Each structure stands twice: as structure tokens, then as C-alpha cells.
Amino acid sequence: MGPRSMVFNSAVFWIQIWGLPFDLMTDDVGKEVGNHISCYVSGDKRKNRTDKARYMCVRVEVDIRNPLHRGGFVLSLEGECIGVFYQYERLPAFCC
């Protein structure tokens, strides 16, 4: 197997989800949002989330042949549609 036969279609990124209400900062919501972006890999295992948390992190395998998602919508517990924004951590400069 030579270097020319290697296929580089995806990359794994940590993505910050901004704008989520605190009551929606759960592992299940993170998994759903991660699967909506592309393919969920894992969530932030830090259990020290406090009421001061401003964003949630998920690790997602992204198909780099497609444009990156900048944000999306989640449904609150009351049924309200809430806009959230994604920030990709350590995104290489050539992807911007």
C-alpha cells in the first residue's frame, strides 16, 4: 500500500457547541448534535460542568470533502427552536 492509494476523506475535530441552554448540556443532546454534524465519536468527559458553562464539547468525525457546518437548531424542553453555533477547535488555517 503506497501513499498514493491512501484516501483522506475525514478528520476528527473537537467542536464547541455555543448557545445551548444549561438544561440541554447533556451527553444525549451532545450525541444528537454530533450525529447531526456528521459522525459522533465522543463527548467531553469532564464532569466538572457548572452553571457557569458557556459551551459544550463533542468530538466528531467530519467528512472534509463537504463544507463545515457553522451552526444548527435544537429543540428546547418547552418545544422552542433554539439556534446554536459551532466552533471547531484547532482547525488548520487552510480550512478557513
Image: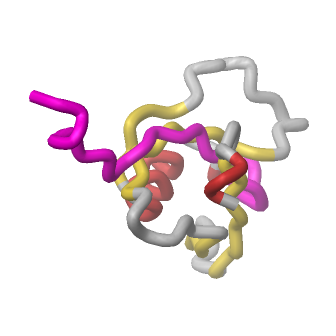
Image position, residue 36 (x, y; %): 42, 63
Colouring used for the render: secondary structure
Left-right relation of 9 to 90: left
Image position, residue 17 (x, y; %): 68, 52
Left-right relation of 45 to 84: left
Could you say which is closer to the camera, residue 48 or residue 39? 39
Give the vertical position of 37 relative to 44 (above or below): below
Q: Residue at x 9, y 28 (%)?
A: 1
Is residue 19 within the magenta segment?
yes
Q: Is residue 47 among the parts visible in the rendering?
A: yes
Could you say which is closer to the camera, residue 38 or residue 45? 38
Q: Residue at x 62, y 57 (%)?
A: 95
Q: Residue at x 70, y 67 (%)?
A: 84
Q: Which residues are magenta?
A: 1-23
Give the vertical position of 82 relative to 89 (above or below): below
Classify residue 46 by image quadrant.
top right
Q: Residue at x 71, y 49 (%)?
A: 93
* The C terminus - image quarter: bottom right
